[in-house]
Amino acid sequence: MQAEPCTYVIFGATGNLSRIKLMPALYHLDVAGKLPEGTRILAIGRRPWDQQKWRSEVRDMVVAKANDDFDETVYLRFCDRLHYHQGDLSQAECYSALAATLEKTEQFSRNMAFYLSISPADFGTVISNLSENELLSEEYGWRRVIIEKPFGYDLDSAQALQKRISHYLTEEQIYRIDHYLGKGMVQNVLVFRFANVMLEPLWNRNYIDHVQITHSESIGIDTRGDYYNSAGAMRDMLQSHLLQMLTLVAMEPPVSMAAESLRDEKVKVLKSIRPIPKEAVHAHAFRGQYGKGQVNGERVVGYLEEAYIPTNSTTETYASMKLYIDNWRWRGVPFYLRTGKRMAKAQSSISICFRHPPLQFFRDTQVHCMTQNWVLLGIQPDECIRVEMTVKEPGLEMRTRTSSLDASFRNQNEKNIDAYEDLLLDVLKGDRSLFLRFDEVEYAWRIIDPILQTWAIERDYIAIYPAGSWGPEDNRLFDKESQTWRSSLTPECK
């Protein structure tokens, strides 16, 4: 699929996401020769900057992320693509002036991608104003709109937002971005599953005991107190990133890697997840909130002591849940998902635990380490694929240990590619396979809505866990006493 030249219009271009991710990603695409000739980047912000000031700011953004890879020659070429448009998103004049700027000069491509790096509350306003100024019309070139999560606050608001923006955009024009799906290791889950035939016969309820998906963070809420207190861990991570990883682990092989085929299979998984009735929420979900503690040797305050957080807040900074997929492949296999702030380590991983052998041959020997086999997929920061096996120790006695077979994702001389580079390039190509279709978003909300509604009513208790730990005790989620959270990517029995 060939990338076409376009005008990338970035709303909220002076914000944190643009500074840390978007502008460095676009620069690195230019370094790699992936930005087509004629591609322009038009930043929209309220600050009274001229072109020279904007280009100076972008240079700082790029240098901060490029480290030793900054190339002055490439940057000068990249600089020629940069333009700045001052405007207030709430003012109609911003959009009419933008339309005039894009129309009056031939340097801007007729293909346009509008990146909404703004508050979700402003999505509808911006899209309606773009439409009123005929900036979404595809008469002379394609128009694509990239929307950052969260898409809605719950099921009702997601449906309302979709109804509003669908007045102006077709589904094919909407690119709902989940940067997790742009991570190379997440995409490698598909390759690992569908390009290695030896595992496919084992990838089902007959051999797999349970699946764990973890995203832990050692950081707190930083300066996002206002946003985070209204969202919480369930909305912020579980509804989007972790459920998406679950679909990749559990989906059936798609007909092809074409966008719609891939997304059809993901939706089938979400549709097959057993609904959680409100009276069963406590058996399927658990929440916690970090208290004061130590992270990386540094003392940190608890959530209720953070800036902009009410002292009586019951917003969860830790959330875990148990799901069942009621289809032929996965019937009866529990999927455990968890995420949390201020935990012992920053880590994203998928841990797949296999059943015990049907017969224990070694019960009368000195074998002390008959652990179950695991397949471990490290997403970040440790990108790895490991298969744990039980092997005999050298020596005269029958003793065993766990050994892992490692398949390295990246060779030492290969560079890390930021997820946004992948996704921004896919927009140019019109490849929507790593972006979310609305029915994916809708079914994800249907899964967690009963939990959120129950938690909103029950505000009298929330478990507190010390910062720097692996979260609160939520072992009641597990189906068996032998099942516990797996927090390590290295063999736990040596």
Image: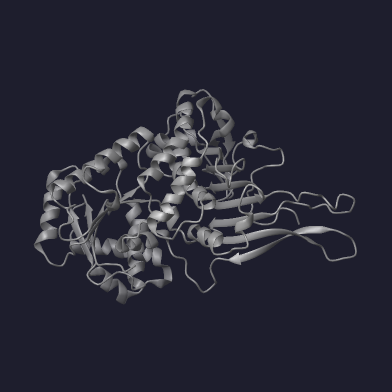
Q: Is residue 106 above or below residue 328?
A: below
- Residue 220 in view, yes or no: no
Front in this rendered view, residue 64 or 276: 276
What kind of colouring is applied to the model shown?
one colour
Check the picture and name the quadrant holding the C terminus: bottom right
Front in this rendered view, residue 183 or 289: 183
- Residue 231 in view, yes or no: yes
Q: Is residue 494 left or right of residue 61?
A: right
Quarter of image, res 75: bottom left
Q: Which residue is drawn at 42% across and 71% down?
A: 68
Position in image of residue 48 (x %, y %): 18, 53
Front in this rendered view, residue 119 or 198: 198
Q: Is residue 370 left or right of residue 326?
A: right
Q: Is residue 294 above or below residue 192?
A: above
Position in image of residue 293 (x %, y %): 58, 40
Q: Which residue is drawn at 30% across and 69% down?
A: 35
Check the picture and name the quadrant holding the N terminus: bottom left
Front in this rendered view, residue 293 or 133: 133
Q: Is residue 138 left or right of residue 436?
A: left
Q: In this view, does 162 lie above or below 278?
A: below
Position in image of residue 432 (x %, y %): 35, 56
Position in image of residue 398 (x %, y %): 87, 59
Total residue callouts: 0
